Amino acid sequence: MTAERYVIIGNGAAANAAADLLRREDPDSPITLISDEAFPFYYRHKLSDYLAGWVEEGDLTVRSPEHYRQTKLRLRLGQRVVKVALAERTLYLAHMEKVHYTKLLLCTGGTPRIPEPLQVHREHLTCLKTLADARVFRTKLAEVDRLLLVGGDMVSVRVAARLVEAGKEVHFLVDRDSFWPLELTDERYDELVKALDKRGVKLLEGDRITDIVAGEPHCLKVTTGHGASLDCGLIGAFFGYVPNVDFLLGSGLDIERGVLVDDHLQTSDPHVYAAGDCAQVYNPDIRNYWVSIGWPNAERLGRCAASNMLGAVQQVDEPPQKALSIEGIKVCTPWWRQF
Ligand SMILES: Cc1cc2nc3c(=O)[nH]c(=O)nc-3n(C[C@H](O)[C@H](O)[C@H](O)COP(=O)(O)OP(=O)(O)OC[C@H]3O[C@@H](n4cnc5c(N)ncnc54)[C@H](O)[C@@H]3O)c2cc1C
């Protein structure tokens, strides 16, 4: 096998599944994973338990740094890629170090979505995507008794439940357009409302935030379109996630919502692949691209991309739909796992 220099941007489910397969099939070539997070690979779905104090940081780890040493995978944590130069097959880190690759895999996941009307209040909204976010959330929570959650994605239902169990007064301003990563049908909307109500969450339906004013420390005054006002210590925003691709704009790669890849997960550059939440994958059956989200989905795409980087010609397969009940809400999806 010709010596390759594999570089993977990311250290989540897609990146690790790909790295494992690359290492198994190619024991000698250098493989580097680069992540802008400072932590080893961890379970994102446990962040809601961490917020509420049910688990501690050590319980989140999927694999320790020792695993990477043993498998000769180079793991570079806390290093952000700011630019990819396709012609030079080089990427640039924030401190302007250059890293050369022969094959590059983008596994950069998603970033929290904040709807346009709320962008102006961004500084008052607390999101939950990374362990660093969860640390901030947990620190703020220690100071507040009442909080408001806005949005209504699948992650938020578990967060709301955990916070009520932790003794907090939780208000929820439900947004019908936020049931990430699935569509909110009328039936699911009813189930979502029922699930939140059953857990003792105070619901504000069909309303929206019109203003947020910071008062005393840990006091935000929220006004809504229906004229309600609420003092709360924290506003958690749960509007789902969008592919994390901003740093690739201008690179020459085709980008729409995510990184556009064909049904073999190759981008518009033959040396670059993408997998997981950041990829927008071509589906020949519907002749369109779509972003598919969830932990098992990221692993599956990561393995498929790695196979093709090794020279296989593997098409992304569509696993069968599975019926799940997530926090009391019925969904049918092949992508998401009920942990
Ligand atoms: C709170 C929460 C709960 C969830 N619960 C569930 C669940 O119950 N079931 C389920 O199936 N899914 C769940 N998900 C979704 C699931 O975690 C994701 O679909 C999955 O983690 C996606 O994996 P990924 O490898 O594509 O990306 P990610 O896990 O998001 O990893 C992205 C990686 O890219 C790195 N990165 C990004 N940009 C750069 C850059 N410029 N430079 C360097 N590094 C970069 C990041 O540091 C990170 O390591 C949950 C997600 C969250 C946030």
Image (spheres, helix red, strand yellow):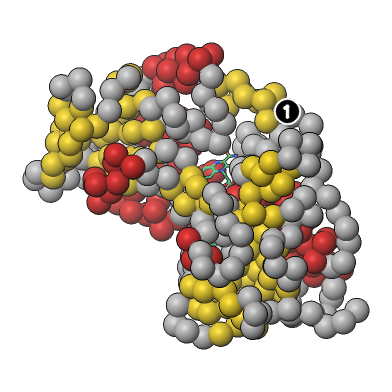
* Residue 293 placement: quadrant: top right
Q: Is 311 in front, or is 237? A: 311
Q: Is residue 32 above or below residue 237?
A: below
Q: Is 205 in front, or is 12? A: 205
Total marks placed: 1
Whether residue 121 sits left or right of residue 272 in the image: it is: left
Residue at the spot 69% in from the left edge and 48% down from the top edge? 281
> Residue furthest toward the left?
216
- For the question of whether residue 336 can be seen, the reply is yes
User: Which residue type does callout 1 highlight?
Assistant: Lys
Q: Secondary structure at mark 1?
A: strand
Q: Is residue 228 above or below residue 298?
A: above
Question: Which quarter of the rendering shows the C terminus?
Answer: top right
Whether residue 175 sits left or right of residue 319 in the image: it is: left
Residue at the spot 80% in from the left edge and 70% down from the top edge? 23
Q: Position of residue 295 (x, y in %)?
A: 64, 45
* Residue 206 placement: quadrant: top left
Question: Which quarter of the rendering shows the N terminus?
Answer: bottom right
Residue at the spot 48% in from the left edge and 18% down from the top edge? 189
* Residue 88 placement: quadrant: bottom right
Q: Residues within 10 Å of mark 1 (few under 14, many from 20)?
A: few
Whether residue 98 sits left or right of residue 54 in the image: it is: right
**Residue with the mark numbered 1:** 322
Residue at the spot 50% in from the left edge and 15% down from the top edge? 186
